[in-house]
Amino acid sequence: MILDVIDVHVRIGGSHILQGVTFGVRADGVTALLGRNGAGKTTTVRAVLGLVPGTGRVVFDGADITGRPTHTIVRHGVGYAPEDRGIFGALTVAENLRLAERDPLPRYDLVFDLFPELRSRARQPAGTLSGGQQQMVAIGRALLNDNRLLIVDEPTKGLAPLVVGEVAEALTRAGTATTVLLVEQNLPLVRRLATDVVVLDQGRVVHTGPAAELLGDPERARALLGVATRGGRRA
Ligand SMILES: Nc1ncnc2c1ncn2[C@@H]1O[C@H](COP(=O)(O)OP(=O)(O)OP(=O)(O)O)[C@@H](O)[C@H]1O
């Protein structure tokens, strides 16, 4: 496992939001973190990154990163593309990438190889890109550094179906370069990309296993996620 989340609890205000979350992320795959709205997916990701205080343990690539500050965790090799993508709209694509440089030798060759559009649009203000292209910038930024895990939070939220295909392609390419932990509610996309799934419900893990197994069992998927697994419906 490249990431082990062990018995993580998060309390915010008076709410016990994560109630002992435990799962592992296998290296060299795409693990999808699934669950209904409010299940605790984003909070789990934020706990891994040290953005919310919690209890329990988080082990990344053999190192105990529990309680470490976020900047230390990301330097260990964790990339993050947040739900709102965190793009600077007034800056160009090249400037957005430059701001993300962390390692002495940023991997521009890899990023431009995976996303040639980022090279051809280098001088374009990122705010004028399509949602899918902005997602490529967000993913490209994370891949610029030598990250061994890329966490992508709901990359297709609010995107038109055509653009979802673009993002799927971008994530497929990202998955060739690094392990991906993907928070996603679009099950056709999960079916296309994920090797493994972790399902959260009310702040607990209620299912883990191969993606094909869960998505191939519509009744179980419906019971766990409250949605149909066929027909392209969004959760
Ligand atoms: N800062 C906060 N203060 C209070 N409650 C919070 C806070 N952050 C999250 N929550 C609550 O914790 C629960 C889990 O939220 P979280 O965003 O992790 O869920 P999610 O599975 O990512 O949901 P979604 O799919 O809607 O993004 C929700 O009930 C949410 O309202």
Image: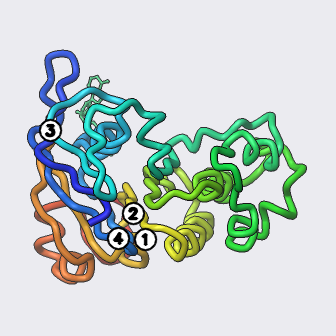
The residue positioned 72% from the left and 39% from the top of the image is 99
Q: Between residues 176 and 218, which one lies in front from this camera angle?
A: 176
* Count of labels in the image: 4
- Where residue 98 sits, quadrant-wise, is top right
Left or right, 183 with respect to 167, comes to: left
Residue at mark 2: 186
Q: Secondary structure at mark 2?
A: loop
> Which is more N-terminal, label 3 or label 4?
4
The residue positioned 18% from the left and 52% from the top of the image is 200
Q: Are marks 1 and 4 in contact (CB under 8 Å)?
A: no
Q: Amino acid at mark 4?
A: Ala
The residue positioned 25% from the left and 40% from the top of the image is 38
Tell me the distance, in whole angstroms, between the alpha carbons under discs 1 and 2: 5 Å
Ligand 1 quadrant? top left
Q: Are marks 4 and 3 in contact (CB under 8 Å)?
A: no
> Which is more N-terminal, label 4 or label 1?
4
Residue at mark 1: 189
Residue at mark 4: 27
Query: Where 83 falls versus 110 (above or below)?
Result: above
Q: Quick one: quadrant of the N terminus?
A: bottom left
The 10 Å Cα crowd at callout 2, few under 14, some 14 to 19, many 20 or more, is some
> Which is more N-terminal, label 3 or label 2?
3
